[in-house]
Each structure stands twice: as C-alpha cells, then as structure tokens.
C-alpha cells in the first residue's frame, strides 16, 4: 500500500510539472546562457516568444584573446529567428542566426561575419526554466586583413557547433 501511494505521488508530481511546462508560450521572455562545445566562447541571450511558433533571440558574447602578446576582447553581437516545429515535451525548432564578431585591440578593429542554420530543441522543466541543445551549421566570412578568432585572413569557413542552452523565463 505504501509503495502504491508513493508511486502515485511521484506520478502526480511528474504529470503536474508536465502540465505546467505545456502552458502557452506566447509572450514569454527568457534570459539564457549558451555554452559552445567546439570553442571556448559563450553567449548570453534573450528569448522573446512572439507567438506559439516564433522566437526572436538577440545574443551577446565576449572572449578575451591573447595573440602574440597582443591582447584584445572579442565581442559578439547577433540575433536569431527560430520557428518551433511542434509543442512536444521537447520543443524542436529550426531557424537561422546572424552574428558579427568584433575584435578591438591595439590600433585595429577586425570584423568577422557568421551566418548559421540552426536545428535544436528546448525542454521546459517548469514554466520558468528550460534546458536545450542546438546543432549549428556556420558559414563564416573572416576579416580581409586578419581574424584573431580564427587565426586566418580573408577566408570562408564552414563549420558545425554543438551548443547547450539554459534559460530562465521571467514571464
């Protein structure tokens, strides 16, 4: 009897948390952190759910770089537009991101452009907290003089990134 009662309690808590996670997402605003496995850079983002199926995500990131005793800070500014495919327990999405990477150090400023195709998913643990993962296919156009982020000049790079996301929703 005790086992049945305990199991019933566990299932009730699980299904209650699932019902909280499935509430309407339109109008939600989230603050998040993205950790990228293939590089030592990280991004902070805001998530604006403009409807049940469309998310707009401005991003900001930085990285300190030391190249041949020249130090600088790599600033990343970008925006993503994501389309939610379906509202399962894990919310899958497709989309794109555009990001500029600016490195200012010394007398010059370098600029790289990154265009990304994104496939990912987000799992709402509760109404206000989610975890997710993304796979990005990046098209990168580096600065014509030099790119400290990629240690190359005037190049076109195609690469993939694996990203983990954590978000806290305010609304």
Image: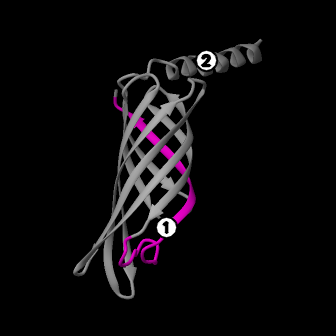
Of callouts 2 and 1, which one flags the residue occurring earlier in the amino acid sequence? 2
| Residue 170 or residue 76, whichever sits in front | 76
Q: Nearer the viewer, residue 12 or 102?
A: 102
Furthest toward the left, the residue is 107
Q: Secondary structure at mark 2?
A: helix
Q: Quadrant of the C terminus?
A: top left
Q: Circle 2 is placed at which residue position? A: 15
Location of residue 109 in the rendering, given as x and y in whole percent from the top left corner: 27, 73
Residue 70: within the magenta? no
Residue 31, percent across and down? Answer: 36, 40
Q: Secondary structure at mark 1?
A: strand
What number is the disc on residue 156? 1
Residue 161 sits inside the magenta stretch: yes
For the residue pair 123 and 93, the one nearer the viewer reads as 93
Q: Quadrant of residue 16?
A: top right
Quick check: marks 2 and 1 in contact, CB under 8 Å?
A: no
Region of the chain picked out in magenta, as a range:
143-170
**Residue 42 found in image quarter:** bottom left
Figure check: 56 above or below 137: above
Residue 163 place in picture, x, y as percent: 54, 51
Q: Residue at x 55, y 62 (%)?
A: 158
Q: Number of numbered discs present?
A: 2
Could you tell me how far apart the alpha carbons at marks 2 and 1 are, in whole angstroms? 48 Å
Which residue is drawn at the image coordinates 53% and 48% (left, top)?
164
């Amino acid at each position: 009897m005790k086992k049945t009662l305990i199991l019933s309690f566990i299932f009730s808590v699980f299904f209650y948390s699932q019902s909280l996670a499935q509430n309407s997402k339109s109008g939600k605003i989230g603050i998040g952190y993205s950790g990228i496995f293939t590089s030592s850079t990280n991004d902070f983002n805001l998530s604006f759910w403009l409807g049940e199926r469309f998310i707009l995500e401005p991003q900001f990131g930085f990285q300190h770089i030391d190249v041949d005793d020249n130090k600088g800070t790599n600033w990343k500014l970008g925006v993503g537009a994501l389309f939610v495919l379906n509202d399962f327990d894990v919310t899958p999405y497709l989309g794109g991101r555009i990001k500029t990477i600016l490195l200012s150090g010394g007398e010059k400023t370098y600029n790289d452009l990154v265009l990304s195709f994104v496939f990912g998913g987000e799992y709402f643990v509760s109404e206000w907290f989610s975890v997710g993962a993304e796979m990005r296919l990046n098209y990168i156009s580096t600065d014509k003089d030099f790119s400290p982020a990629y240690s190359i000049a005037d190049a076109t790079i195609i690469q993939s990134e694996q990203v983990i996301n954590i978000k806290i929703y305010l609304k």
